[in-house]
Amino acid sequence: LYVGPESAGQGVGAGLLDMLEGLLRDCGFHAVCAEASVNARDFYFRRGYRVAGAQAPNGAWPIAKELPKPPRS
């Protein structure tokens, strides 16, 4: 997930991540696993992701987050 520097700090990335997590939840996924760059790591930490392994040789960090269950109708 990347946004242009001109969009940084304006909630664009957070909105996109919320949409993606909602789509994954709607498809029946219970967790998200991804890799975060050093620059993006804190962004994901603020949104509930945790380190899920050792830093890769390319500098990426494996991250993961359990998705909350969707509300029952």
Image: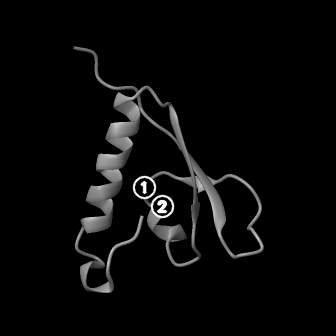
Q: Position of residue 63 (x, y in %)?
A: 60, 55
Residue 70 versus residue 37 in the image, above or below = above
Q: Label 2 is placed on what type of residue?
A: Tyr
* Residue 24 sits above or below residue 39 on the image: above
Quarter occupied by the N terminus = bottom left
Q: Measured from the top left, where is residue 69 in percent x and y? A: 40, 26
State the residue lying farthest toward the top.
Answer: 73
Q: Residue at x 31, y 50 (%)?
A: 18
Where is mark 2, residue-wise? 44
- Relative placement, left or right, of 46 versus 70 is right
Q: Is residue 20 left or right of residue 31?
A: left
Which secondary structure lies at badge 1?
A: loop
Q: Residue at x 32, y 65 (%)?
A: 13
Spatial CA distance of label 2 from label 1 is 5 Å
Residue picked out by circle 1: 47
- Return the x and y of residue 70 as percentages of the image width and height: 33, 26
Q: Is residue 68 left or right of residue 14?
A: right
Name the one closer to the observer, 28 or 73: 28
The quadrant holding residue 8 is bottom left
Circle 2 crowding by C-alpha within 10 Å: few under 14, some 14–19, many from 20: some
Vertical order, 36 against 5 (above or below): above
Question: Where is residue 24 shown, x and y percent of the image?
Answer: 40, 37
Q: Are marks 2 and 1 in contact (CB under 8 Å)?
A: yes
* Amino acid on which the number 1 mark rests in the picture: Arg
